[in-house]
Amino acid sequence: MASLSKTATTRTPRRVEVNQRALVDKVLARYPEEFTVFRELLQNADDARATKVLIEFQTKDYVTHSAGANGKTNGINGTTDIPDLLTTKLFKWVVRNNGDYFEDKDWGRLTKIADGNPDEQKIGAFGVGFYSVFGITDSPLVLSGGKSLSIFFQGDQLYTLDDACSQSEWTSIEMVLKEDMQVPVPKPFDLARFLAATMTFMSSVENAHVSFDNKVFMKIVKSRQVPSPIRVPKDMIPRSKEDTMHIKGLSVVTQGITVELTDWARAAGTKITSAHRSGNENLSKDPVKRKSFWDGSKREAPKVAKVTKAVSRASTYDHPPWLTYSAKYAVYSAQVTTSPSKDLHKGLRAMTKKDPPSHFDFEMVYFSKEEQDARTAEEKSDPDTGSIFKGPQGLFPQLDGEYMSRIFIGQSTAQTTGISGHMSGRFIPTVERGSIDLTNGHIAKWNQELLYVGGFLARLVYEQEIRKVQDAWPTVNGVVVPTADARASASREKASYAMRYFTFQPSTPDAKVSRILQDAFFDCFDYYSNVHFPILTNSGIRYTKDVREIHADFSSFMKMVPTQLPTSPGDPPSLVDILPEKYGVRTYTFSDVVKELQGRILQEEEMIGCLRWWVNFISSLEADEERETTLTFLSNLTDNAKSRIGNSTRVIELHNITKFVDASVWLPWLQSDDALPPDTIPFSFTRALDRRHISPSLLWQPMTLVDWLSHLISPQIDAAHDIRKKLYIF
């Protein structure tokens, strides 16, 4: 070993050579989704506190002559005044923002791969997001504050060249397209869908304009009302399991998004077919009921949607009719402070080259049922393109569908949440932002702790939204209208929607995300001080501890205890199905039955159901000892059971009953209106019961002829039934 060490010290180390072109092309510019360049550059704009972003698509004629060939391009239907976005090829993309100019440190980072922004309040962590532009260009040019920097390849190595430029209010990134990227404008409808979602969690950017050869064809405006504070519930646990994240405040704000699109841009259509756009939403869980079950190998591949909308005759290049789309939604926010352990802090700094943020807002979107219904109506009214807010990378997700809500880290990642609300927080992603990192040591620990905040906020939103439904639920004389009542239909639908919204499903690409969120969703309450979990029942919104599972044996007479709603094969997954044991809906107990009997007088049909349940249950017990033990509860049942007889006002109390009418003895001789002894239950109550099981189950004896005759001559018998005043022939 000594000789080897000595030999090693005499050798000269050689630098590892990196093929920078291959590194950029194969790693840094390979992102999993469309519109990645815009995602990264808009995030840079938001970090620079920009309020407005311009995206410009330019043809070679426009770039060459600075006027787009006198303002004319190839047109539609033989005209020259409206650009043909379907076939006209682009030469250059430009993205501008009105944020802070580049400082020296910003220029320096552009010349260094993987030198992330050290500012803990900035999103960028790895310093590679900007290099996504190399997916479309080999020579980006950055202009800001009177300075410029061009980045280009010589051979396989990257070089930069700085220079001065004219002063402008804009910071601009100009990208002359690679030859194979000189294709028409991305589908404007799809781009608008992406940008509307992209701007959701941006802290500064409020406006985006998109143009073709300096003619604006898309405008997007985000508005935000004044936030309303929410008190942190005292029985919720506002800190993560390892005490890294602390929730100091909560708020909610209504946010709106408006998209304007020219009709000639709208006419370019969308890449998504109506069949693909609808995803799996509302599909039956029964595979036989799905069309694909019968399609077999003959099923055709999805086709690009055709352009079916004609351009308005009133449209011109300079003055096109505008189509306007609007949506609004609630953004719930948790104000988070962090206190990572020394080991976690050190590990995060080593991996991200920056301190973890000391504070930030964690946000979650809630889309109301009314807004979701509006998107569904848009899809139905325009089946060719659907809703501009719904679809791949869209703002509105599909409940139980293909396009689910996502995790945002400033911008959207490919990681879904497993529920129907987008979430945004200071997660640390994988390098390509495909998902959040739950693999690498300290980063995984940070992300797991942050997912607790996500689960906490999701639970808070659920509690807030379901309580709104509960407060608005219709009542009559202070009594909640039953869920099945038509008067409760609006409340019922809103409650069902809220429960469906928060029904956790497997997240992708990492299934652990939804599992961690779900655990936090149910564990963020101090269970010892709060055992309440509200759900929709047959009697409005009730806590699960007071709700019982539906059971056919009890449904005919148990009316006071709320039950979960019935389900059918093929129904979407239910939040009730994933409740942990501590919040689970319970089965009926004998105490429930006794409380029901104590609480009201049953109708005859209800009492028949109660007796049927008891007799069938006792007769099903095979062991004598078990039967005898169970019969000790009979007195609790009969002491409290009261029932009306038919439609009359007469009431019988079971504790007075000791006999029943044996059908094998008395039928057909006994008539329904014949008087019975007061200790004999009317035959209508026991008609449906097996007479062999009545005595063993209820300890009643068959009424004898002596019993009946004695009653007919008793002083309390009414004159109409007095045997001494009426002749009976047998």
Image: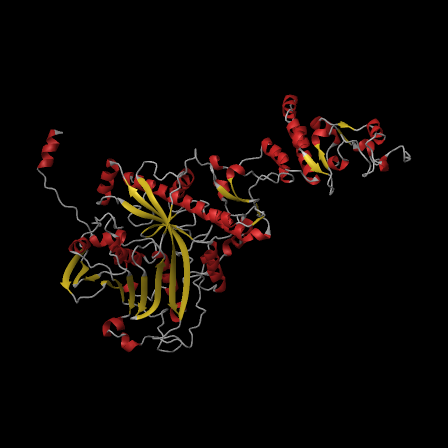
Give 292 or 220, whichever is nearer the viewer: 220
Judge left or right: residue 419 versus residue 555. left
Q: Name the residue located 46 percent from the left edge and 52 percent from the top edge.
A: 401
How far across and down, in percent of the image, does residue 709 sit?
A: 85, 29
The mark tally for this picture is 0
Give 74 or 534, whichever is nearer the viewer: 534
State the image quarter where residue 269 is shown: bottom left
Quarter of the image with the C terminus is: top right
Q: Is residue 684 visible?
A: yes
Q: How is the image coloured?
A: secondary structure
Q: List the single residue furthest toward the front.
A: 715
Judge left or right: residue 721 versus residue 388. right
How far across and down, in percent of the image, does residue 50 sit?
A: 26, 59
Give 539 or 524, whichever is nearer the viewer: 539
How far across and down, in percent of the image, does residue 420 sit?
A: 43, 50
Q: List the single residue furthest toward the left.
A: 10
How far across and down, in percent of the image, does residue 660 sit?
A: 76, 31
Quarter of the image with the N terminus is: top left
Image vertical order of residue 405 relative to residue 384, above or below: above
Q: List the single residue furthest toward the top.
A: 625
Q: Name the residue located 9 percent from the left edge and 33 percent from the top edge.
A: 6
Image vertical order of residue 576 relative to residue 173, above or below: above
State the image quarter where residue 307 is shown: bottom left
Q: Is residue 511 visible?
A: no
Judge left or right: residue 260 versus residue 294. left
Judge left or right: residue 99 versus residue 275. left
Give 243 or 28, whichever is nearer the viewer: 243
